[in-house]
Image (cartoon, rainbow, N blue to C red):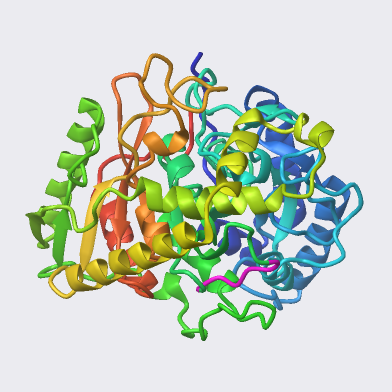
Amino acid sequence: MQQKNAPQKTDLRQLTQQFNAGETSPVETCAAVFDRIEQRNPAINAFSHLCIEDAMSSARASEARWKTGKPLSPIDGVPCTVKDIVLSKDWPTTFGSAVLGQDSPAKDDSPIVARLKEAGAVIVGLTTTPELGWKAVTDSKKFGITRNPWDTTKTPGGSSGGAAAAAAADLGVLHVGTDGGGSIRIPASFCGIVGHKPSFGRVPAYPISPFGTVAHVGPMARTVYDTAAMLSIISSPDNRDWHALKPDGIRYEDHLATSLKGKKFGYSLDLGHIKVDPQIADAFLNAIKVFEALGADVTEVASPVDPCQSIFHDHWFAGAGYRIRHLSDSQKAQLDPGLVEIAAQGQQISLHQYIEAGQLRAEMGAKMIAFHENYDYLLTPTTPIPAFDAGLEFPAQSSDTRWTDWAGFNYPFNLTQQPACSVPCGLTDQGLPVGLQIVGPKYADLAVLQAAYAFEQAHDGDFSVAP
């Protein structure tokens, strides 16, 4: 059933201008967000925990700063959410699980949450995730099924599905996601929002994910500008992450407007092997025309990456196996059966097999470096299919046996650690969003956001708030 009566979307720039002018306040804004959560969240189940008292306290402190003209940052007082897999000092982090999470508040903030709090952001709640973020849809035994605001019979995707659903329903402005195999970009595509998987190390993480160096942390929002502004805050350094990149000192949101004239885009509809739904293909090919109209040099290319599902499985499944290695049989019985299955497979991966996967991964990365010597960007659909029925790991009546069977546009670029952004590019006949994926060279986060911004401004659709 489709929801109706779309709310007016909350835009970061407009909101902070209103704070500065005294036309509205962080307290009023926070209260309005909780009103919308009360109205819309029962149907979509995007939150595992609401931080009402703490959020209102933070909003009052922010309001006092704005009144004296001394906000902490451009996002001071702005409502945010945090995925319930990222440590937040004031609240328990459950990892979507009755077994893997913690009952007491975390002792430390993760780097991303620390940076948001330091910037004065108002964290309104923790968003749902499948257990350990292991799959690309969002449901769990502990919190039930999270649903897509565009059509509540459909999945929002995952594993950052709660964040995407909250963003699409206007239940907050900025949203923390994680992406180990598409977990930011897939739900961004299914829910019609923007999701950016940064270059690995761009956003510091702590503690390190059991899924290792395929796991990224990044921003999700309804617009490219908001996504870029969030990245400017959360990419600040943190010495707890030894993978963290040296800060580039860029305020991304200040450098988005640029010409794409003469930029070289290679596009692939199927990466050489992925079956794509015809409506996804139509929306994607129409998006290509937008880049051509912007003066870009756009060329169809052979896939620069070979099929790599087995390489990804060796990394992903091994991480799952490591994470639950100490659980008893009775504890495992309380987990999502699919998580238990991939963990069992991961525990059978030999050391030689794991090392070989790393070698093959390195070859993939080298191929993408060579590709970007000739092309500034690679364009693909974000997903080959639109959102399917909620509560399923893969579409009914499909031949798929795991979520990775339909997520082949995403995990290659976790393996290569490149920046990749999903931006809305259309709707299916059933009114479900379609996402365009823009991939850039490693560390070229600004360039990817610039291309996404140019497309967003030129495209005639606005899919950022679900009806």
Name, please, the residue furthest toward the right: 104
Residue 2 in view in this figure: yes
**Would you place residue 20 above or below residue 343 in this image?**
below
Residue 78 left/right relative to 453: right
**Tally of numbered tags:** 0
What residue is at 52 percent from the left and 42 percent from the top?
9
Query: Can residue 418 be found in the magenta stretch?
Result: no
Residue 249 left/right relative to 106: left
The part of the chain drawn in magenta is: 202-207
**Would you place residue 194 above or below residue 76 in this image?**
above
What residue is at 62 percent from the left and 66 percent from the top?
75
Residue 174 in view in this figure: no
On the image, the x and y values in percent for residue 308 come to: 33, 50
Residue 4 or 168: which is nearer the viewer? 168
Quadrant of residue 426 in the image? top left
Quadrant of residue 462 in the image? top left
On the image, the x and y values in percent for residue 225 come to: 44, 61
What residue is at 52 percent from the left and 65 percent from the top?
213
Magenta stretch, main secondary structure, is: loop
On the image, the x and y values in percent for residue 289 come to: 12, 47
Residue 452 or 465: which is nearer the viewer? 452
Residue 303 left/right relative to 126: left
Residue 327 left/right relative to 453: right
On the image, the x and y values in percent for residue 265 come to: 15, 61
